Image (cartoon, grey):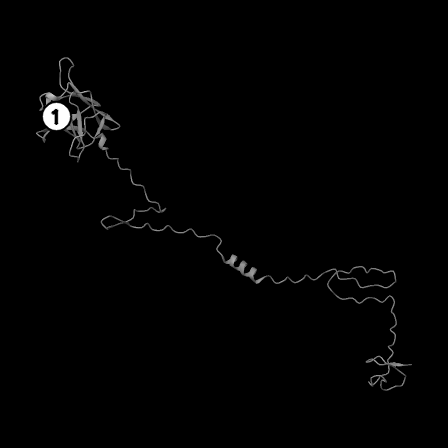
Amino acid sequence: MSITCTVCGTVNPDGTTYCEGCGVELSAPQTAAPTPAVENAAPATTDTGLPDMPLPETGSGTTEMPQAAAEIPAAPMDSDPADSLTETSADSAPAAEATPAPLPMPEAVTPDGDLTPPPAQDDAGTVPVAAAMPAPTPQSDAPAKLGIKKYGAPTGEFIPLQGERLVVGRFDASSGPVDIDLTGMGGQEHISRRHAELYRENGGWMVRDLGSTNGVYVKKSGESAFSPRLQEPAALADGDEVAFGNLMLTFHQG
């Protein structure tokens, strides 16, 4: 029987102590004793706490140990730290945002520099609406009148304008009376029987010439001269002067 070197693989004659190829000490081979086959041996059992299950039979006549029916669940993988932080932040957030409290109203400053306290609020935080004040009467709805002037100065006498349309002129037996009769006033000789008309329009007063001989003229408040003879109706404002021929009157309203 030969001895094969386990280092270099050289086959040496039986009884050689050292390998002829590499010089390593050789050891005699050992023959393993055959293991007798055990037929129909009962498989080893392990107490797993599971119910007994029938053993399958194979064609060779030998039995095999079946796999355990129960499986051990795999351990869950570690989640991403970022996801954990996100979930933690989401869990720590409040379920609902709190309703902000109403801010106090700032104090108003008057033109004189004084502070005006804000209006009082009720329990619900709303400011009660003040009762509506009556609107002031427009100037156009105020009573109007003509002030009489003599020698360029007001006399303190007035002619009230009452009605929607008033004819200015002189009385004549053939044409009849007029609404504003200027007979007896200075400059009446320049006044026609139906000289002009004063009437209301859009809440204001207008004046127009009715084809008089000497015309109608208007001097606006603050101006120094009368306008040219009226060809179209003109609107009157408080303080304007109107001349019928050479007779001058002042329009007042309010």
Q: Secondary structure at mark 1?
A: strand
Residue 25: x and y in percent read 83, 85
Which of 198/187 is in front?
Answer: 187
Which of 104/203 is in front?
Answer: 203
In this picture, residue 177 sits left or right of residue 124: left
Which of 227/209 is in front?
Answer: 227
Residue 109: x and y in percent read 26, 49
Query: Which residue type does callout 1 highlight?
Result: Leu
Screen quadrant of the C terminus: top left
The residue singled out by tag 1 in the image is: 247
Residue sitting at x 57%, y 63%: 81
Which image quadrant for residue 64?
bottom right
Screen quadrant of the N terminus: bottom right
Which of 67/21 is in front?
Answer: 21
Classify 40 as above or below 126: below
In this picture, residue 12 sits left or right of residue 239: right
Residue sitting at x 12%, y 25%: 247
Classify 211 as above or below 65: above
In this picture, residue 170 sits left or right of residue 134: left
Residue sitting at x 10%, y 23%: 187
